[in-house]
Image: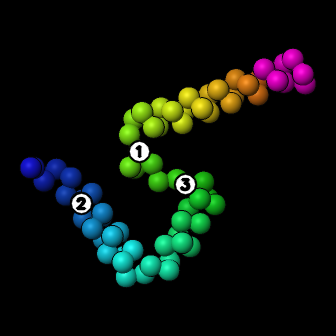
């Protein structure tokens, strides 16, 4: 296996190490990340991201439809 993603592997190892050492801070970090609107989409596949984008487009179309006919 080539070492093309060495920095990603190192980042993942450091993140796991930090989570093990500071278990209480994980809840705070997750709350802060969710509050600032920065979800961690690194682990999502292209189908998941496409589903999220499709949902947002459908909601936008529904909002425009509502504003045109009922607003």
Q: Is residue 37 left or right of residue 7?
A: right
Residue farthest top in this picture: 69
Secondary element under disc 3, as helix, strand or loop, is loop
The residue beneath circle 2 is 9
Instruction: Provide the residue span drawn in magenta.
Output: 65-71
Rendered residue at 54%/65% (across/down): 30
- Give the mark nearest the N terminus, 2 or 1: 2
Q: Quadrant of residue 17?
A: bottom left
Point out the tag, 1 or 3, that comes first from the N-terminus: 3
User: In which quadrant is the C terminus drawn?
Assistant: top right
Residue furthest right in the image: 71
Badge nearest the viewer, 1 or 3: 1
> Badge 2: few (under 14), some or many (20 or more) residues near its Cα, within 10 Å?
few
Q: Residue at x 60, y 32 (%)?
A: 55
Residue 70 inside the magenta-drawn segment: yes
Say whether residue 23 is left or right of residue 61. left
Q: Which residue occupies 62% across, 28% down?
A: 57
Magenta-drawn stretch, dominant element (helix, strand or loop): helix
Q: Is the Cβ of the residue at disc 2 closer than 8 Å to that at disc 1?
A: no
Residue 38 - label: 3
SS at circle 2: helix
First-in-chain label (2 vs 3): 2
Query: Measured from the top left, where is residue 69 in percent x and y?
Result: 87, 17
- Residues at marks 2 and 3, CA–CA distance in whole angstroms: 21 Å
Quadrant position of residue 38: bottom right
Taking the image as shown, residue 38 lies to the left or right of residue 69, namely left
Circles 1 and 3, Cβ within 8 Å, touching? The answer is no
Q: How is the image coloured?
A: rainbow
């Amino acid at each position: 296996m080539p070492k093309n993603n060495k920095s990603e592997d190192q980042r993942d190892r450091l993140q796991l190490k930090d989570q093990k050492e500071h278990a209480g801070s994980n809840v705070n970090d997750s709350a802060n990340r969710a509050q600032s609107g920065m979800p961690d989409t690194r682990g999502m596949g292209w189908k998941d991201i496409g589903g999220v984008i499709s949902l947002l487009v459908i909601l936008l179309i529904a909002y425009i439809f509502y504003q045109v006919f009922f607003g």
